[in-house]
Image: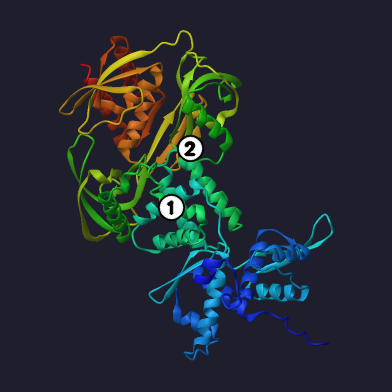
Amino acid sequence: MKEFIKTKKITYNLMSFTAFKALILFSELAESPKSYSEICDIFYNHPYLHEKISIDTLRVYINSLKRFGCEIKRVKGDDKISKYVITSHPFELKYNPEQLQSALKVFKSLVKNMDIEELISMEEFFEKIGTYIKNEDFINEAKKVSLLKDIDKNLLKTLLECCEKKNQIIITYASPNSGEKNMELIADKIELTNGKIYLCGIGFEYKEYGTFLVNRIKSVDDIKSETTMPEGLQEIKVVYELYNNKQPELESYETIIEQTDNTFVVEAVTSNKFLLRQRLLALGPNCKIISPDEFKNEFVALLKDMKAGYYCG
Amino acid sequence: MAKKTPEKCNESCIKMFEFLKRLYNGEVEFKWVIEHFSDGQYDGTSNTHVTLNKYLNALKIFGVKVKKENGKYHMLSPLYKINFDLNDIKSINNLKKACEILPNGKNKSNCEEFIRELEIRYDKSAQSVTQVGDTTQSLHLAFYHSEMAEQIKLCEKYCQDKLKLELIYTDDKGEEINLLASPIETIYKKRKVCLKVIGSNGSRVYEIPIDNIKSVKQLPSSVNSNSVPTTIVYKIKNRLAKNYRLRDWEKLQDINSDGSHVIVNKDEDFNVLLNRLMRYGTECEIISPKFIKDEMIDLINKTLSNYQ
C-alpha cells in the first residue's frame, strides 16, 4: 500500500483486481443502465485497469452480484441496445415500520418548536427518505405531521424571501368573505399559529398590519423593486402594564419602557387595533391599559359586552 | 428435462460484498472476517491474511474506507452513499438531538437506528458538514439545555410508569400550586415543553411548563384509566365561525340557524382554553359546564376590576 501511495501504480500483489472490478461494476450499474460496450470502455479507460472485459467474465460478475442479492435487469433504450442495471441491492436504506413510526413520532414532538424554514427542510428530508425506501405512505404521513400538507412549498419559499427583504408584493388571495382578489402588502414575517401558517405584513387595502392565511394565497403576482408605505396608514401607540413574575414574551411591535418588581410597562405601536385587542384580552387580569383613553374605553366596553352576553344569552 | 447447471460466480467477490453488508450493520469482529474469507478453515497461516489485505486494499483504493480498531472493523466511508445536503444534515441533527432526550425504550432505540442507517450512508460532503460543527443552532429549543433534558426524561418516565403524582408548580403569577394528578404525556408547545396531567379532582387537564415544576412525588397508586377529561362546549359566531379551524381535540357539534357553530372541546388545559376564548371577545360564549362558564365570567370580572 505504501508503494501505491508513492507510485500510484497498482500491482496484483497489492490488491484483488477481481474485487476492484466488481466494485466498479456495482457502482456503475447502480448509477444507471450500461451496455456491454460501455462497461468495456469504462474498464479500458480506468487508470488502474486498462483492459477490456469479456462477455463471459461480465456474466460471472453479474451472477455474483445477483447471488449477493442485487436485482439486475436487462433493459433496452431508444437505441435498442441491451443494457444492464441494478434496480435494488442489499446496501439500500431499509427500515422496519417501527423505526419509521419512531422517527415520525420524534418529528411530531419537534414540529411546533420549529420555524418555517426548518419545517420545510424537515418535510423535504422525510420526502427524500420516503423516496429512497420507496414508501409513499411514509411520505404522506410525514406531510400530515409537518403542517405543510396543503401548502405550495415553492410559494412559501418565495414568501419567506419576500419577508426577509421586506418586499412590497401583490398576491392573489382567496378571501373567505370577498372571493379571489389581488392584494398589495409589505411582507414582514411568516408565522405559525395553531397549526396554521400566516403571512404577516402591512396591507394596502385596509391600511393596517394584518395576517393572511398562506394556504389562501394562490400566487405572488408581482414583487416591486421599491417599497412605499400605504398612504393614510395610521399607527396607534398603546401603553399598558403587565403583571408577570417573569420577563414577558413580547410581540415584535412591543417594547418594555419601564419595569418594577412584577410589573412591566409596555408600549405597543401597531396599525392593527384588532390584533392588539385580541392579545390584551388573552392576557386577562394580568394586563391593564394605561393609554390612550379612547382605546382603553373601547376595551372596557367590549369586556362589559362579553359579560352581558353571559347574563342575557 | 435437463437439470439447470448453477451459474458461474466469483465466490471471493460475494464474500467481499457480504463483508461490506455486515459493515453497514455496524462493527465487525476480525475473527469473523478472517473466518469468512477462509471459508471457516482459518489455520493461522499468512495466506488468508494476504488475501484479506488484498481485498481491503481494493476497497481502500476504490474509496471505501474501512478501519480496524481494537480487533474490530468499522466502515468510515461507504460503497453506497446517499447525497444529503446541508438542510438534510440539519434535519438529521435536529432529530438526533430530540432523540437524545427520549427515555430509554423502544422508541429511542428505533429512532437511533433510523439515524444510524443514514449516518453510515453519508457521502464526503455530508461527513465534512457534520464535522464542521453543530448544525442545530438555529433550532432554539429550550430542551437543548442539559438541565431541561434531564427533567424531560423524568417526565417521560412518569408518563410511562403510570403512577399518580403529587406536584408542586408555580403559575404565571409565581404562586405555588399543589396538585394531585395523573400524568398523560409530555408535549411541546411554542418552544416550551409541558407535562400534561389530568387532575384527580374534576378531570381537569393541566399543561404545566416543566420549568415551572418545583417538585414531583410519585405515589404508590396507579392512574385511573377510566378518568375522562371534562368536555367543554362553546359557541362561536359571525366572522370567527366562518374562519375558525378546529383543533385536533375539538369537534363541531352543531351549526345553528343564525350561523353560529357549537364546538366541543376535550383535553385542553382549562387556563389555556379560557385565555384563548377571551381573545375572541363577544364572538364566543361558553355553554357548559357551568363551573367553566363561571370561571370565564370571573376572568372577565377580574379584568374589568383593573379599570374600576
Horizontal and vertical percent for residue A311? 32, 23
The residue closer to the viewer here, A223 or B300, is A223
Please give the name of the residue rendered at 72% of the width and 65% of the height, measured from the top-left corner: A44
For the residues marked 2 and 1, what is the alpha-carbon distance in whole angstroms? 51 Å
Chain letter belonging to callout 2 = B
Instruction: Find the residue positioned furthest to the front.
Output: A7
The residue labelled by disc 2 is B253
In which quarter of the view is residue B295 placed?
Answer: top left
Q: Please determine whether, in this image, residue B303 is positioned above or below residue A112.
A: above
Q: How is the image coloured?
A: rainbow
Quarter of the image with the C terminus of chain A is top left
Kind of residue sitting beneath label 1: Thr
- Label 1's element? helix
Q: Please determine whether, in this image, residue B50 is positioned above or below residue B171.
A: below
Using the rendered image of the protein, determine whether residue B114 is visible from the camera's viewpoint. yes
The residue closer to the viewer here, A144 or B253, is A144
Q: Is residue B188 left or right of residue A155?
A: left
**Depth-wise, is mark 2 or mark 1 nearer the camera?**
1
Horizontal and vertical percent for residue B268? 36, 41
Marks 2/1 in contact by CB < 8 Å: the verdict is no
In which quarter of the view is residue A47 placed?
Answer: bottom right
The residue labelled by disc 1 is B130
- Which dot marks residue A67? none
- Label 2's element? strand
Q: Please determine whether, in this image, residue A199 is positioned above or below residue A30.
A: above
